Image (cartoon, helix red, strand yellow):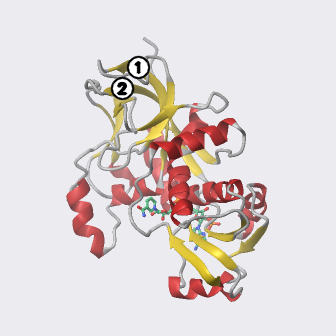
Amino acid sequence: MKAIVCTKYGPPEVLQLKEVEKPSPRKNEVCIKIFATAVTASDCIIRGFNVPGSLWLPMGLAVGFTKPRQPILGIVLAGEVESAGSDIRSFKKGDRVFGWDLFPAFGAYAEYKCMPEKGMLAIKPANVTYEEAAAIPYGGLLALHYLKKGNIQSGQKILIYGASGAVGTSAVQLARYFGAEVTGVCSTTNLEWVRSLGASTVIDYTKEDFTNREGTYDFIFDAVGKRKSSKFQGKKALTPYGKYISVDDGSPKPHIDDLILLKELLEAGKMRPVIDRIYPLEQMAEAHRYVDKGHKKGNVVITVEHNKT
Ligand SMILES: NC(=O)c1ccc[n+]([C@@H]2O[C@H](COP(=O)([O-])OP(=O)(O)OC[C@H]3O[C@@H](n4cnc5c(N)ncnc54)[C@H](OP(=O)(O)O)[C@@H]3O)[C@@H](O)[C@H]2O)c1
């Protein structure tokens, strides 16, 4: 099968299109024919091994020190169940699915990938395309994890910093769904469409420092981890019992119920996928170059074409 192999850590050019062996499902696994994946911020961090010194050892132990132990990167996928192991009960051949498989599994930059039945895999909503489905799990699951961690409540005033990225666009929509009053912080060009996702107020970070709005927010979620000013300073904008959470606080381990909730919200039209650009698998290095710039709007999706047999 075709796959993008990460030959060593480094710039996007280390990603090369190769022929590799097609995986076969174990008894408890399904093999998915992938039609779409996405280039996430995490993929770029791993490809470049761009981690702060304190994470160098744990990251190296988890994924490999000189090159990724699993050379096929890619966390999210949307596709069709091509075959199922003998113990599989909840999926069958032909099911259209979407999901994610965080490190050290990866493997979605390929034509096929095997996943355990009990993994983060669900039936794809019928009202979205494979490309749209691939744009949901990463930002959606991370945003849901942190909003729940912050115990988001209806009626709260929440500020989402970095509202235009993959995590931010999901966080805005989910916070609205939970009944919060949302303020989104983004740059000038993104103000109007962040508002269209459900933010009742938008702040342009190039013109205003939100920390000047002292004592305003019940919950601040830094969805992009790029705030130049410190968390301490950011906390000034909180109400006395407010919470401040950054996407870089810990390693989230989402639950399958979270993916099911995202599926239901998509089906009900209460959440929509946000896609910036779409590249074919063969242009993976180009897609990484774009995501490396740190200014994508929502998600960068990759389509996987299969040769007709
Ligand atoms: N803790 C964990 O385990 C974990 C797991 C996964 C991801 N993460 C982190 O989550 C973060 C978010 O991922 P993502 O995929 O959502 O990122 P992303 O989509 O790459 O973020 C791009 C967006 O960030 C905005 N942005 C860039 N600089 C900004 C700034 N100084 N202030 C406000 N917004 C800014 C850009 O808007 P403009 O173009 O308008 O600037 C752009 O829309 C990543 O940094 C990743 O490392 C953490």
Please indicate whether residue 196 sits to the left or right of residue 305 in the image.
right
Residues 68 and 235: in front is 235
The residue tagged with tag 1: helix, strand or loop? strand
Q: Tell me: residue 230, above or below residue 201.
A: below
Q: Residue at x 36, y 26 (%)?
A: 30
Q: Which residue is mark 2?
A: 30
Q: Amino acid at mark 1?
A: Glu
Q: Tell me: residue 49, above or below residue 256.
A: below
Residues 56 and 98: in front is 98
**Image-quadrant location for residue 11:** bottom left
Q: Amino acid at mark 2?
A: Val
The numbered dot on residue 181 is: none
Disc 1 to disc 2, C-alpha distance: 8 Å
Q: Earlier in the sequence, mark 1 or mark 2?
A: 2
Q: Which residue is mark 1?
A: 82
Q: Of all residues shown, which one is farthest toward the top?
A: 309
> In x, y percent, where is residue 95?
49, 21
Q: Is residue 230 visible?
A: no
Q: Residue at x 34, y 60 (%)?
A: 48
Q: Residue at x 40, y 44 (%)?
A: 74
Q: Is residue 253 visible?
A: yes
Query: Cβ of disc 1 within 8 Å of ligand 1?
Result: no
> In x, y percent, where is residue 259?
52, 43
Please indicate whether residue 220 sits to the left or right of residue 45 in the image.
right
> In x, y percent, where is residue 213?
71, 85
**Image-quadrant location for residue 71:** top left
The quadrant of the picture occupied by the C terminus is: top left
The answer to whether the residue labelled 1 contacts the one labelled 2, judged by CB atoms less than 8 Å apart, is: yes
Q: Tell me: residue 121, above or below residue 28.
A: below
